[in-house]
Amino acid sequence: MTARILVADGVATTRIRLKVRLAAACYDVITVETPERLRMRALADRPDLIVLGEGFAAPGPIEICKRLQGDRDLAAIPVLMLAGAAGRLDALRAGAAAVLSVDVDEQMLLARIRGLLRDAESDIELQSALAEAPTAFVAPSARIEIALVADSPARALRWRHLLRDRLSCRFSIHNPEEALAAAASGRAAALYLIAADIEGRGDGLRLMSELRSRSGSRDSAFVIATTPERDELSAVALDLGAGDVLPIDLGGGGGIESTVLALQAQLSRKKQGDRRRAELRRNMMWAMTDPLTGLHNRRYALPRLAETVGNARRDRLPFAVLLLDLDRFKRVNDLHGHAAGDAVLREVARRLETVIGPQGIAARLGGEEFLAILPGADEAAAYRCAEDLRRAVEAQPIPLPDLSGGGSVHVTLSVGVATGRPCQEGLRPDQLAEWSLERADRALMLAKSHGRNRVMLAQTEHAA
């Protein structure tokens, strides 16, 4: 889908020039000439990005940017400001996502736009995923680390000296090999500040690409530092995934505040992304977990069964499906109340999980019915496991909560077992999984009809 960009500038020639440049890159471009029309069109057309020029008198572009960032309906739209060197710091303070010079070349302009749109799309994807589940609490993270990979130890020390009193972070100095090793061992930095040329031309960009491809560091923030004579690497760095590009001297003494604001913006975005990813992981876990027992639920277990069948077919190995049902569970609820029934289900789930262990999957399908999936288990192994499960439930009475009057209750379990036949090429894995589940269900019904508290194999009966 073509990205929509709103160009706002009070000077007609600037608007026309930007529209031509962006339309040539196949963007859908809207132009406005006043601050009032800017807000109106932004609300109506919901652009993916706002490019704000400096051709406004009152209010000026800095004030306009502040208003956009303070507008609840528009604050999520990134703003790319075009400003002179003197206005860069004020633009960053106003909340601009990025600032470019008014006479920026086309390659850098388009690279920066691609980067901002890529970041915004990533944020939207995370937000969309989170919208399907409740928000979870995420504990605050430890003190953040910035890794410095410069073109010389002296440069890295200079960077640290400039930044450590201005950013409340821990700074580490690495060469490329050390940075990769730390990420591989689970010690990735929150942000990497990397010189574009470290030991060779462009090797800093290669290091960034390598770190972004590693699972441990792909979610880190990346900023590339370039020398004036290698400024052509700035656009390349942005296209490779850098969040920002800075001068190799970090702005020196006078411009260091702009650098600090740029790094703070990257760290803020990193923190927000981490929070959203943590929420998404937790919400996904909640969506796949039975809230009462903590076991996997039906939504998780049935796809894993099909996956197990597919793996069994590929590797020519057996598998087993166990359906388990508590005997006369309704009596527990009727005699002792639902709090007692919940306590029984939780304790039974704990015993099942203990017996099955990490070699299989235990799930609650609903009510008092449970499922166990045993990859690699033949009929004998599956029967032994089912008997272990039955005995574990029968062996000890289950304590009841004081709310239900205390005491304890004995419960028993009936189990139906079906072993898979991966050699049956006529069925797809999901079909074979469903067929195996039906066989286990018929065996369970047979166990119930033969007196309960027993294990029955599909097609072959084994009484306890």
Image (tube, grey):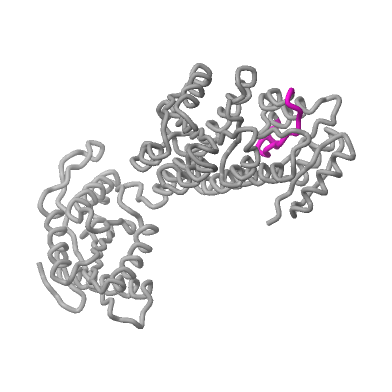
Q: Residue at x 15, y 62 (%)?
A: 385
The C terminus sits in image quarter: bottom left
Q: Residue at horizontal 19%, vertical 79%?
A: 459
Picture quadrant where residue 331 is located? bottom left
- At 65% across and 34% down in the image, what residue appears? 97
| Picture quadrant of residue 96 | top right
Q: Is residue 446 magenta?
A: no
Q: If the image is split into quadrants, where does the N terminus sit? A: bottom right
From which residue to which does the magenta span run? Answer: 71-86
Q: Position of residue 160 (x, y in %)?
A: 48, 22
* Placement of 455 over or under 412, stated as above or below: below
Q: How far across and how far down the image is residue 323, in percent?
A: 25, 65
Q: Nearer the viewer, residue 116 or 83?
A: 83
Q: Is residue 110 left or right of residue 289?
A: right
Residue 64 point in image, percent of width and height: 77, 29
Residue in the foreground of this view, choosing between 332 and 314: 314
Q: In the shown orientation, is residue 317 left or right of residue 395?
A: right
| Residue 120 picture quarter | top right
Left or right: 233, with 173 as reference point: right
Which residue is farthest right? 12
Query: Number of numbered discs present?
Result: 0
| 132 horizontally vs 464: left or right | right
Q: Main secondary structure of the magenta part?
A: loop
